[in-house]
Image (tube, rainbow, N blue to C red):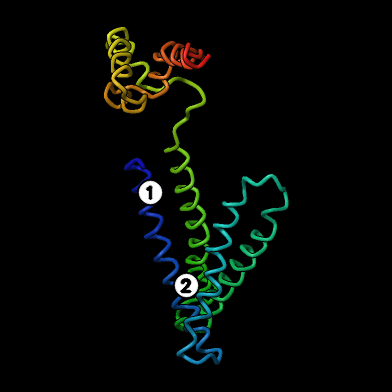
Amino acid sequence: MSPVVATAIAGTVVIAAGAFWLSFTSLTDLARRSGIAPSRAWVWPLIVDGIIVVATVAVVALSSSSDPHATWYPWSLLASGAAVSVAANALHAVIAADADVPALVAASVASVPPVVLLAITHLTVHLTRNADVAREPDVSGSPAPSDAISVDTGPVDQRAEAEQLRLDGMSNRAIARHLGVHPSTVGRWLAPIDASTTATAAIPSKEQR
């Protein structure tokens, strides 16, 4: 993972934690004011904002599915959870706001954390997913970098050395590590030797006839 992607992921996690905490405290107080016991009021914001996080991860995870309806249910949960969280945060701000602060302003400020939580969770999942894809090597196209290096550093000498090491009983993988080339390169070099060895083994000796 590159430093830029790592920094971006760390930043999104910090912002998501801050947005979750602000929304969590507001919803906990609203639950307490609504009659839920203080010892259990903290569970309500976990349910509301937890749906946003889980549904966002599910939407991204199912986005590559061949079924066009695979993300319908996660999107429904995501929209419902976000709507409830934004409305509850805004309602709490109206109830608990100071008298000199307009209710509309208080509601607008309080609705920012759940919206940011929704956006930043989606961004974090995309960053981690694309970073994992970028780390996966593409072996379907161009040859391995070690092949290009071996061309510039004397492939004839390396091939001769590989043949000698094979005759000494060393495996292709061990030869590749020893010479610093890809195992497929060693396989191509030693293909004639392997073919001749196989043909020799297939010819029965005089004692077997």
Is disc 1 placed on a helix, strand or loop?
helix
The residue closer to the viewer here, 61 or 206, is 206
Mark 1, other Cα within 10 Å: few <14 / some 14–19 / many ≥20 = some
Q: Which of the 4 image quarters holds residue 172?
A: top left
Query: Left or right: 53 with respect to 160?
Result: right
Which residue is nearer to you in this view: 62 or 94?
A: 62
Amino acid type, mark 1: Ala
Residue 64 or residue 126, whichever sits in front: 64
Mark 2 surroundings: few (<14), some (14-19) or many (≥20) residues within 10 A: many
Q: Nearer the viewer, residue 182 or 141?
A: 182
**Residue 65 pos. (x, y %):** 65, 47
Which of discs 2 and 1 lies nearer the camera? The answer is: 1
The residue under the point 58% across, 61% down is: 55
> Residue 149 at what x, y percent from top left?
32, 16
Q: Which residue is mark 2?
A: 23
Question: At numbered mark 2, what does the secondary structure look like: helix, strand or loop?
Answer: helix
Instruction: Name above or below for residue 203 compared with residue 57.
Output: above
Seen in the picture, residue 77 relative to 125 is either above or below; the reply is below
- Between marks 2 and 1, how big is the CA–CA gap? 22 Å
- Mark 2 vs 1, N-terminal side: 1
The amino acid at mark 2 is Ser
Label 1 belongs to which residue? 8
